[in-house]
Amino acid sequence: GTQAAAPDLYGVHRLVLDVAERRELPREKAAALLNLADLDARTGRTAEALVRYRAALDAGREANDPYATGRAMESVGGAHLELGDYDRAADWFGRALAQRLARDERADAARVYGRIATAHTYAGRYGEAVRSWRA
């Protein structure tokens, strides 16, 4: 699975990142950083993933790439959730939700509402969690 392939995939995505940085390609840089961060997250390196997700967000903004920025914001929230920082997770999920709603991405927005509800549930804010689940 991903665990076994991680070293090879990591090398490939690192190479793509190096090329994107040298050629000043922010969209490709964002994609490579998202892929590297996903590998970090899947192999238990959540703190490292968080740093890469934030860098991917910056690159996505530089490229004016709504897919990369939305994905990065949601992933930053997921990393905070995994690290037990439920308030920051809910905040980042809220940012991702605002972008999804602004772009009328309803299926993605529904998923993010669920992630916000999860963060509120873990934080013990059950009323807010129920409101998010119902949205």
Image (spheres, rainbow, N blue to C red):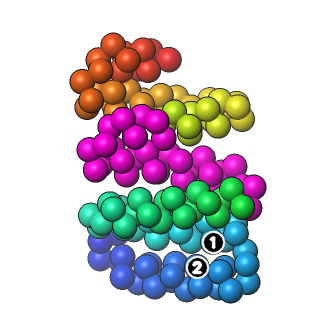
Residue 111 at x, y percent in the picture: 48, 34
Q: CA distance from mark 2 to mark 1?
A: 5 Å
Up-down relation of residue 24 to residue 102 (above or below): below
Left or right: 73 with respect to 81? right
Residue 81 at x, y percent in the picture: 33, 44
Residue 29 in sight here: yes
Q: Residue at x 47, y 28 (%)?
A: 113
Magenta residues, start to end: 63-92
Q: Secondary structure at mark 2?
A: helix
Front residue of 108 and 71 = 71
Left or right: 80 with respect to 62? left
Q: Residue at x 73, y 78 (%)?
A: 24
Up-down relation of residue 98 to residue 71 (above or below): above
Residue 29 at x, y percent in the picture: 63, 72
Q: Which mark is residue 47?
A: none
Name the residue tied to disc 2.
17
| Amino acid, disc 2 | Leu
Q: Quadrant of the N terminus?
A: bottom left
In which quarter of the view is residue 107 placed? top right
